[in-house]
Image (cartoon, rainbow, N blue to C red):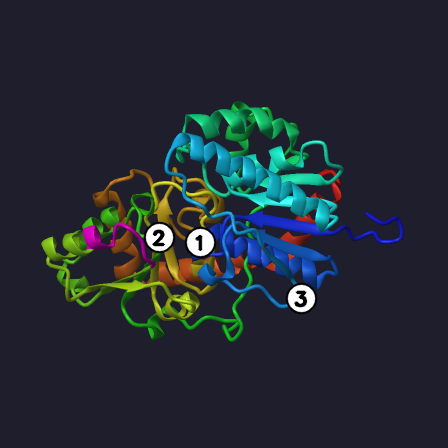
Amino acid sequence: MKSQDLRPRVGLIVSTLGAGGAERSVVGLATGLQKRGYDTTVMTFSTASGDFYRLPEPVNRVELDLMVKSGNPIAAVKNNIRRIQVIRQSIKRLHLDVVISFMDATNVLTLLAAHGLTCRVLVSERIDPAHHQVGHVWAALRRFVYRHADEIVVQTSQVASWIRRNTSARSVRLIPNFLSPPAGAPLAPRPLEERPATIIAAGRLHRQKGFDLLLQAFSLIKTKPELDHWTLQIYGDGKERDNLLQQIKELKLEKSVTLMGISERLVDAMLAGRVFVLSSRNEGFPNVLLEAMSAGCAVCGFREVSGVSDLIQHGQNGLLVDKMDAQSLANSIYTLCNDTVVSHSLAVAAHRVSQNYLDETIMPAWIDAVHGKSTG
């Protein structure tokens, strides 16, 4: 860092800018840093052709072109050595003062690449590692190399505890995700009674997201005559799509459930829906839940999932589901759909609480992390 310039050059490293929560967080953080005068670069293993999210033009984009499939263990070792070399060369070529990496394997590679360099290195865990298996080799490497990070950034106290117990991390800093309201979104969402009777869910179509549980729960509430007119829209794509379509058919929900695919304007669906259900079996920090709260939806999710109870105070701004099964989830969904007084009150409170996670509230914590300032 030049002595006359108090703002360091910052580089963010992530494998892709595809349609995921971590990728969206990278774009949001890069945008926030750039707006505050930081020379910011985003490095990706992938090329821009696979991007879902777009970076604002002032942010420098470097395509490392490292998304090579390994056919066997020897090829995997060679490819990862090359990744380490390319990351290291890029850090030096860009004269980065601070490097922030995202996601487990990328974190390990970045720490190995930056070893011995003078830059400050932060690594960010974006999912609950207690429930996300990375394989024995990557898990062992994570335990060993995390000691070389200046700080590990996590999103919830639950993940912070796991990192302290299971790695050699020297310092762990908790920074929740922040909410960047999309352009055009109203400051005050429409009241629920003005919206159609629609339940919204969103995420990768993967077992982790629990859409199979959601479909079972929805089939249970559809047996209630008073909720027969309700519909369910699930946004996202992934390898479970065919299985979910088959489940919809078996449950005879074809007329009331739609798999909507990926949407660049998910917020519009949330603003039009009454209820949002987070059915995930595990998360890091559920961005999509925070966005639904900001959109003024009545929300529910499983209590034991990381980040959910950080956002939802049961009975105040949403409902926490104590047991991870379809019947328990159905009970909470039924309350949100059928009790308009309760759902309206929860939705209003959810929107109010979500404003605590705006860019201007959370970004100062990232600025402190970039500069290595104590959390207090």
Residue underneath mark 1: 20
For the residue marked with disc 3, what is the amino acid? Pro
Q: CA distance from mark 1 to mark 3?
A: 22 Å
Which image quarter: residue 129?
Answer: top left
Which image quarter: residue 195?
Answer: bottom left
Residue underneath mark 3: 58
Bin the neighbour count of mark 2 within 10 Å (Cα to Cα): few under 14, some 14-19, many 20 and up: many
Extreme residue toward the right, this view: 4
* Residue 345 rendering spot, x and y as whole percentages: 41, 60
First of labels 2, 3 by sequence position? 3
For the residue marked with disc 1, what is the amino acid? Gly
The residue lying at 47 percent from left, 52 percent from top is 21
Residue range corresponding to the magenta coloring: 236-244
- Give yes or no for contact between labels 1 and 2 (Cβ–Cβ under 8 Å): yes
Residue underneath mark 2: 204
* Residue 319 rendering spot, x and y as whole percentages: 37, 49
Q: CA distance from mark 2 to mark 3?
A: 30 Å
Location of the C terminus by quadrant is top right
Marking on residue 206: none
Relative horizontal placement of residue 310, taking residue 344 as reference (left or right): right
The residue lying at 42 percent from left, 33 percent from top is 134
* Residue 323 rendering spot, x and y as whole percentages: 29, 38
The residue lying at 40 percent from left, 66 percent from top is 266
Closer-to-camera residue (243/303): 243
